Image (tube, rainbow, N blue to C red):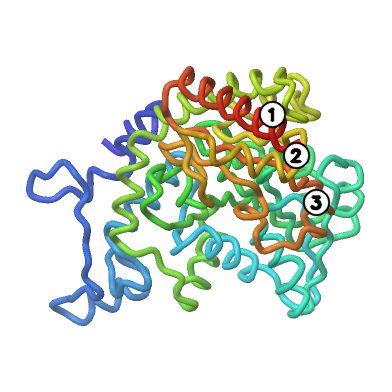
Amino acid sequence: MAKRVDEASIGTRSVWGGEEESLMQGSTQVPVVHSVSFGYSDIDSWHEVALGKKRGHIYGRNTNPTVEVFEEKVRLLEGAEAATSFSTGMAAISNVLFTFLSPGDRVVSIKDTYGGTNKIFLEFLPRFQVEVQLCDTHDHQAMEERIARGCRVLYLETPTNPTLKIVDLARLIQAAHRVGAIVIVDNTFATPINQNPLQWGADLVIHSATKFLGGHADALGGVVAGSKHLVKQVYHYREINGATLDPMSAYLLLRGMKTLHLRIRQQNQSAMAIAQFLENHPGVDGVYYPGLSSHIHHGIAKKQMKGFGGVLSFSLKGGLEAVRRFLPRLRHAHLAANLGSVETVAGPPRTTSHVECSEEERRAMGIPEGLIRYSVGVEETEDLLRDLEQALQAASSAEMKSS
């Protein structure tokens, strides 16, 4: 049965992947195994499992049956050899970087990474004498030149959070492999439905499972997938440092992933319609969405993505004051620091993706204070369009009354 699931379409893998072997006593759903430890009747079998020579579980910080199913489902969706999970997306990112970077190493990345990732590059890694080179995301030639000087890790994020910039995976991965670098790609915004970085040659792919994979804003988690050789090293670092995904969160993420392909299909459709609407609205200064033909890297996105994702950003004329008037008038959106949920979520980077950064740091990354990140839910597209229209109109009327 597992072989047939491997060969099935990605939507079917979202539903069935990794689950059959874990079902118990005729159940149709994966059980939540809360046990911290796992017992053995003889010490020899126990020892074989402990050494990894025999399949099984020893202690919850290392592995767990429910968590293992979640990892297997992600492995199948990304077409990877192995996967390992974490308590949060940032745990996944930080653990992977610290697994492979040592004092004296060099990492090349882009300036437009998620705010927490950017803090690791600017604040934490330099304390451990790791050289960090952050490049302008639009300048692929400059990135290739920096990579060619040598690096241990190339870390990419595409689309970026929150300005939806795109990097050419095939081009940059090829440059990194020429110097023997490990390529890590944050695929959170795209999801495995829209993009598979491993198919373009990436060594490891990362997800904040809290976002689109879970899809219901009720469970934290992170996951890394790639070759067995590299994932084994990441797993060893995580098992010792203890950023373990708990079984209940793994269950909730699994439940959410069953509808991943359906959610992404709707979110792709709505995000495109909304981006086109906003691009032509007089109150909007700019729209950031790779599905638009006006996007600077639309051609690259078309090449490496199957869909353009459920997140877009737009800047309002009037800057931050316009944002203050607009956001509270939305009727079908949570104003919150999250994305990828079944409900639409909206907010400015200054309180969401880059709250850790100063205004100057955000400006240096090309993030205007008047920017709004809009994560499309699974509501009807027309309802979201009407909601945006009325909020823009109300915000404009409020501005005229105050002036």
Q: Is residue 1 above or below residue 144?
A: above
Q: Residue type at mark 1? A: Pro
Question: Circle 1 is placed at which residue position?
Answer: 290
Element on which disc 1 rests: loop
The CA distance from mark 1 to mark 3 is 18 Å
Disc 1 and disc 3 in contact, CB within 8 angstroms: no
The CA distance from mark 1 to mark 2 is 11 Å
Residue at (16% x, 41% y) in the render: 28
| 226 displayed left or right of 301 | left
Q: Of label 1 and label 2, which has the lower sequence position?
A: 2
Image position, residue 107 (x, y; %): 77, 62
| 269 displayed left or right of 256 | right
Residue 89: which disc? Answer: none
Work out which residue is located at the far left of the displayed protein and give it.
Answer: 25
Q: Nearer the viewer, mark 1 or mark 3?
A: 3
Could you classify mark 1 by the number of other residues whose Cα lies within 10 Å: few (under 14), some (14-19), or many (20 or more)? many
Residue 167: which disc? Answer: 2
Residue at (38% x, 44% y) in the render: 216
Q: Of label 1 and label 3, which has the lower sequence position?
A: 1
Camera-nearest residue between 320 and 310: 320
Q: Residue type at mark 3? A: Met
Residue 365: which disc? Answer: 3
The CA distance from mark 2 to mark 3 is 15 Å
Q: Nearer the viewer, mark 1 or mark 2?
A: 1
Q: Residue type at mark 2? A: Val
**Residue 229 visible in the snapshot:** no
User: Quadrant where the C terminus lies?
Assistant: top right
